[in-house]
Amino acid sequence: MKMTKTLGCLFALMCVCSAFSQEVIDDFQGGLKAALPWSWQVPGNSPLNTLDESRIQYAQGWLQVTLQSGTLQGNASDRNNIRNLPSLPVRAFAPGWIVETRVRLTLNGITGAYIQAGLVFFTNADNYFNFHLTMDPFDANRLKVSAGHELSGSYQWSGITSTGWNPALGNQVRLQIRQDPQTKLIHFYYDRENGVFWQEATGSPKNPADYPALQAILDQGGSVGLYTDAAGRQAGNMPVAAFDYLELYLPPRPTDLNNDGCVDDIDLIQVLLQFGATGPCLIGDVNGNQSVDDDDLLQMLIDFGKGC
Ligand SMILES: [Ca+2]
Ligand SMILES: [Ca+2]
Ligand SMILES: [Ca+2]
């Protein structure tokens, strides 16, 4: 009897937990998954709608982008003209999130440019963070992973990198960014799929405060998508970036009790209504210690307004 009650409660907790997280995966089978709110728009970019269908193909479950000129880097008059940047909208989310893709970069004989393909988090064309596979023209045109961030149009390298390798030894990686739910630090991983499996990038982990444009997206929501950049290359052979999938695991903030993306008075009142209560499965128990008390209230006040 006792066991049944315990299991019932565990099940209820699991239901609450699963209802309060968002796992999304698109494996690009024949196109973008129609059930997901994909967008090709980037606010502040010209054109606003970045889609150029003549450069997009879907083959064997991969999204293939033939690169073209255009970039988000900086805000000069010849910038903010990226093409073919697909993304999904995301709400404010809590530490514990994971974003991952698998990308293959076919260089087609091109050397001497920072060709990039990977993940991007953005608010608009001048506020974003990206983590990508790139060719480094100052390292014998070898491939490596790297990341950059831009705040109000000012671009900076992130301090995240890896040792380089000859593209002939493999031009495909899995890229993963995740925030540790305990330390709040952001970790950057890559897997060259050469039997070594996941490796942590040089410079990882980082404090989210090091990247204010990314921090703003974590706190207020934004978009997560796939970024490609031909580094100013205009004509001739162009590189091709192929993406196998995009996967997002996005736990909402535990203080967003009704899971509407915003921590506001509707959430706060749940804590106040249950203040002093103890026991399992209390919605106002933000930190899950079976007691609704000042710790829960404090966290609610710290998060108040986030995502709204
Ligand atoms: Ca920009
Ligand atoms: Ca809410
Ligand atoms: Ca509590």
Image (cartoon, rainbow, N blue to C red):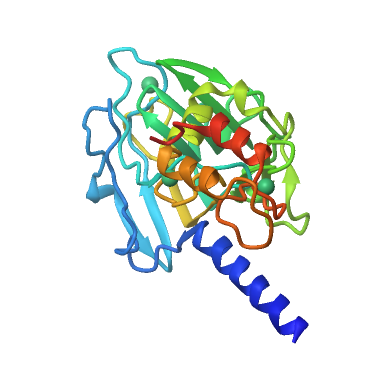
How many discs mark residues in the rendered view?
0
Q: Is residue 168 visible?
A: yes
Q: Residue at x 22, y 33 (%)?
A: 48
Give the left or right position of residue 130, taking residue 59 as reference. right
Q: Is residue 115 visible?
A: no
Q: In the rendering, at what x and y percent does residue 65 appear?
A: 37, 48
Give the left or right position of residue 46, taking residue 24 as reference. left
Q: In the rendering, at what x and y percent does residue 119 appear?
A: 50, 42
- Front one among 98 and 303: 303
- Front one among 150 and 305: 305
- The answer to which image quadrant residue 124 occupies is top left
Q: In the rendering, at what x and y percent does residue 228 appear?
A: 42, 38
Q: Residue at x 24, y 44 (%)?
A: 52
Quadrant in which the C terminus is drawn: top left
Compared with 260, 187 (above or below) is above
- Front one among 69 and 74: 74
- The answer to which image quadrant residue 188 occupies is top right
Give the left or right position of residue 101, taking residue 59 as reference. right
Q: Residue at x 65, y 47 (%)?
A: 276
- The answer to which image quadrant residue 95 occupies is top right
- Front one among 200 and 134: 200
Q: In the rendering, at what x and y percent does residue 41 appear?
A: 27, 39
Quadrant in which the N terminus is drawn: bottom right
